[in-house]
Image: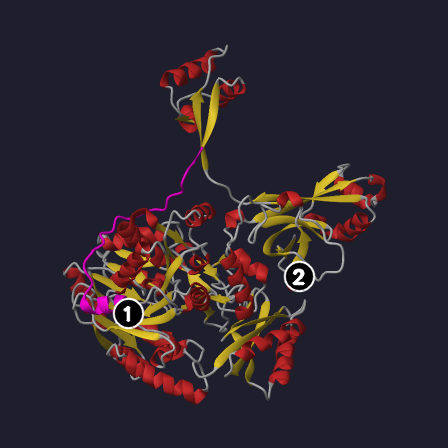
Amino acid sequence: MIANIIVDVNNKNVDQTFSYLIPKNLETFIKIGSRVKVSFGPRLISGIVISITNSTNYEGNLKEIIELVDLEPLLLPFQIELALKMKELFYTKTVENLNLMIPQALRLDYKKEYRINDLSKLSLEFKDYLKGKLTFIYNETYTKFNKEISENILNGNLTLNVNFKQRGKIKEEVYLKYNKDVKTRGKALELLDYLKEINKEIPLKLILENGYSTSSVNTLVSKEAIIKIYKEVKRDLQNINIEVSKNELNQDQQKVVNSVDLNKYNTYLLNGVTASGKTLVYLKLIEKCLKLGKTSILLVPEISLTPQLYNILVNYFNNQVIMIHSGLSMGEKYDEWRKVKEKKAKVIVGARSAIFMPTEDLGIIIIDEEHTKAYIQENSPYYDVKEVAQTLAKMNDIPLLLASATPLVADYYKALNNEYKLLKLDKRATNLPLPKIEIVDLRKELKDGNKSIFSRYLQELINDRLNKHEQVLLFLNRRGFSTSVMCRNCGEIIKCPNCDLPLTYHKYNDSLKCHQCNYEMDNVKICPKCHSNKIRYVGLGTEKIEQEIKALFKDARLLRMDSDVMTKKNSYNEAYLKIVNHECDIIIGTEIVTKGFDFKELTLVGILNADMAFFYPSYDASEVAFTLLEQTSGRAGRFKEGLVVMQSYNPLNKALKASLNHDYVSFYEDEINKRKLMKNPPFYNIIKVSFKSLNKFKAYNKALELKTVLNGDYIVLGPTEDLYFKVNNYYNYNLFIKLKDTYNILELRKFYEEYNDKEVEMKIGRG
């Protein structure tokens, strides 16, 4: 029998299957999805078996598989099928896609150990470096000897042995138990008598805490007087006891639940206003799936939302729930993955990576806040979770439910044109009205002498809510204290040396940070160019808002929520509890506070600069802005009457006026007409082809070369500098290709090999 294997090498030149003979003694054990050890060129590496056949087109002599790494297949057949489909959808490498489905704890680290057969055959410099050792483990310090190492491997003087080590393991705790009497004395005898008298398993750490030494334990273990027992310790995730109402669905919610057919594939779009009770709809659909013995996946866009939803689900479905997101430790993710693999959990909630769980009996996929760009993985490997979910749903013949108060314009268009099934929740579940929105013209405030970021009206409202013991949310989608630092004498702006972007000032540690590459330096007091001390802090972020609120409302309890302060493992849980328990009066936050949160006492939302949302340099800038404003507004008045104040220098903006009345439909109609005129999605597909290089001219010329080839067959825009033109010393140019026929998207792959080289990296994604 022959196994076709994808080897664990992330290189486009080996992105194909390689055939190996399955040894007779492993034929019953090796299956599709098994991880094996194979010889690949001069080294040993692991690989995943993706198919098993009886014949091959390879004309040479096949090597045998050396070893089976895991007793059971690591991946399920549907995961391999999904990885291959993703390769076609997103121009990724198969091994990258397979690794998305393998927990980090199960990934293998390779250790190259070389044995020298004859030291006299090595150069004097290499011998001196080795200091007489006959073996060495290869690392980056040996780079200068690469040529000599290769030559000695070829002539047989160096033998390579590759050791595999799994990164993580099952967490275990050691227990001790009495076994038999032996001759001993002192503390060892005292310990033996104690364990004999107790006559049950005692944790080793408890024994050590009670004054017994490791040497006493080891002495008794070596004499078999006591035995060690290893027990698995579950890394349970923190759970908050949130009351979950098991209320019956209202008429509109029931209609939505009844409309979703769990027995066949369909994509449904649920357009439900904020606080319309979408979460209860999810719970009822998941409940129906559980009764059918099937698993459900519920995706949320932000880590900040997972604790809240996880706790709601745990309190509703008990121990059938697991949570997956990047904020968990490697061990926690491994434990959660195993619960799904062993079919001990049937409800999966999480961010992007939750879609890759090993679910054999999938019943429904739900994507909450489907409008957000957080569902797109920009780093390698690129993928769009919604497309992955749609592929999975088709493979399993199950429904996919997309839900949002502000669906993507392209998705709403598909729903109106019967590609998706449109479902509606037009009223809040509490029967309260959507919050009233008022726009404050900051131009008038400035004319009247108010230079503060807070209009006088907003200050009055904040004071009123504090007197009523209600909560306030202040939104500004920019962290830090000041957005840039400038010299007033010569105009020099302090920039990141790697990214050529202004550094953001953070007052809490008096530092300047780059929010792209994380470069950090001490704050400057003297201009590096003209040596003046006239340094000025320009712009503002959440940290400065916090300082100004402290000065204006001295007795108010503040909570800031942005990625600078939400750094600890349980930061989101702790912040959520503070708000729910009313341990804070004013919440100051960035985009992480705008989605999904449900706070009873929050009655006022202040959007401090509504115009910032419109600065997004893309065809969908108005959509991004409208969505952000509407979602932020939706945090107000979910249980009491709410008010939203939007501060703007451009109050006549169309999208701003649409959000004033929570009028998604009029916004959609205006936006879809513009899209049709400009040949933008959903009428055309936009492919973004990125070129990245340390040499900006080479990146630009490669982009221009491809544009010349494509012009005439496609609408090609660019080359244009990326929004973040220089990042980590790499220059970035983009081409935007507009296509009507989705088939042609796949045709672009043929250019990938030609335009991607060592000096210029080309990446194909969605625009």
Q: Depth check: 664 or 281 in front?
A: 281
- SS label for mark 2: helix
| Residue located at (73% from left, 51% from top) | 42
Q: Depth check: 251 or 386 in front?
A: 251
Residues shaded magenta: 231-259
Residue 393 falls within the magenta-colored stretch: no
- Image location (x, y in percent) of residue 642: 19, 68
Magenta: predominant secondary structure element? loop
Q: Residues within 10 Å of mark 2 (few under 14, many from 20)?
A: some
Q: Quadrant of residue 469?
A: bottom left
Q: Residues within 10 Å of mark 1 (few under 14, many from 20)?
A: few
The amino acid at mark 2 is Val
Label ID, residue 86: none
Circles 2 and 1, Cβ within 8 Å, touching? The answer is: no
Q: Would residue 371 be seen by someone viewing this image from the given angle? A: no
- Image location (x, y in percent) of residue 411: 38, 76
For marks 2 and 1, the one nearer the N-term is 2
Q: Which residue is mark 1?
A: 259
**Residue 668 vs residue 434: left or right?**
right
The amino acid at mark 1 is Ser
- SS label for mark 1: helix
Residue 245 falls within the magenta-colored stretch: yes
Q: Marks 2/1: CA distance?
A: 47 Å
**Residue 44 vs residue 337: left or right?**
right
Q: Would residue 501 be seen by someone viewing this image from the given angle? A: yes
Q: Residue furthest front?
A: 54
| Residue located at (57% from left, 64% from top) | 728
Q: Which residue is mark 2?
A: 14
